[in-house]
Amino acid sequence: MSNFNPQIPKINIDPKKIGRYIVLGVIGLILFIMFLMSWTDVDPGEQGFIYRPYGGGVDKNQVYDEGTIFIAPWNEMIKYNIRQQSKNYVSEVMDINGTDITVKVAVNYAAQKGKIAQLHLKHGPGFISFIDDKAKGAIKDVIGRYTYEQVYSSKREALEGEIESILQNDFKGNYITLYYVEIADVNLPSNIAQEITNKETQKQRNLTAKEKQKEQEYLANALIEKARGDSALVISARFKAEAIQLEAEQIARNPQYIELKKWEKWDGVGSPYGEGNVFGSGVSILKSGR
């Protein structure tokens, strides 16, 4: 019986080669991780710019819209929301007569498209504090020139226009776009609010009493005409004349009364504006009386 002596193959291990492979593997892993980290997203409604800390700083020339962007991993993509935004300001101010009133004003703005790098350099991410200061100052400045009656009723649009004008000038050169200003609410002291309510109620009562008085006068005139023996045709003609006078007064007080009469007489066929209207004979348009 012969002896079996298996021979184990000898493996020559070169420590230098193993070290080289390990180094290459680590470098490859680092490069792969850096490649993955080099992709950044700019979301819808945003714009971005690159900040290069090791050369050039903020890039003011290139702005990136929404999408996935490849940048060097040591650089940074800084993003800003460029959507229209709204900020409400509740301010207690004194009117021109010294009456304290509270107004709620909405300011609609956005970071200027294509200029977010400049906005970042001038104001930074906290640019809203600049808007706050300017908006509050403009509101107090404008509201203080008017009476509370003008603020809550007749001059509201004019006030909004004045505040917009001031903010437009303030935002110019600061890379902020102003869309519009709206006076959303006006709160008066309780005693003044009650006084206004009482005044409006009395005004409506007086108007109703006046209309009833006219009605009684017309009825009395009809009875007089009848007692005089005038014919029904004459009485009808006089009533028509009085009706025309009333209609003329309605039109003077409210131009939308003409629209109402058109729609009252419309039979649903064609257009209440006639065959030759600008909308076409088969088109009917209902206008809202704003």
Image: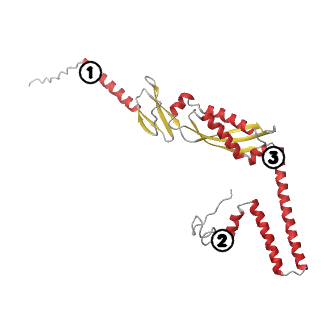
Query: Residue under circle 1?
Result: 18
Quarter of the image for the N terminus: give it.
top left
Task: Choose between 21 and 83: the one closer to the eye.
Answer: 83
Q: Which residue is mark 2?
A: 266
Residue located 76% across and 63% down the image: 250
Question: SS at mark 1?
Answer: helix
Residue 33, numbered circle: none
Quarter of the figure with residue 288? bottom right
Q: Amino acid at mark 3?
A: Ala
What is the C-alpha distance between the residues marked 1 and 3? 89 Å
The percent coordinates of residue 257 (x first, y second) are: 72, 63
41 to 245, vertically: above or below: above
Is 13 positioned to the left or the right of 63 in the image? left
Label whose residue precedes the other's in the sequence (1 or 3) = 1
Sequence order check: which comes first, mark 2 or mark 1?
Answer: 1
SS of the residue under disc 3: helix
Amino acid on which the number 2 mark rests in the picture: Trp
Asked whether the residues under the numbered discs 3 and 2 touch, taking CB atoms below 8 Å apart as contact, a structural biologist would say no
Q: Quadrant of residue 162?
A: top right
Q: Tell which residue pokes out farthest to the left in this image.
A: 1
Proximity of marks 2 and 1: CB atoms separated by less than 8 Å: no
The label on residue 193 is 3
Q: Residue 230, how many percent across, how many down?
A: 87, 80
Apparent side of residue 18 relative to residue 188 in the rendered image (left or right): left
Q: Nearer the viewer, mark 3 or mark 2?
A: 2
Q: Is residue 197 above or below residue 88?
A: below
Amino acid type at image mark 1: Ile
Q: Earlier in the sequence, mark 3 or mark 2?
A: 3
x 82%, y 51%: residue: 197
Residue 182: x and y in percent read 66, 44
Q: Is residue 245 left or right of residue 68?
A: right
Residue 264 position in % (x across, y down): 69, 69
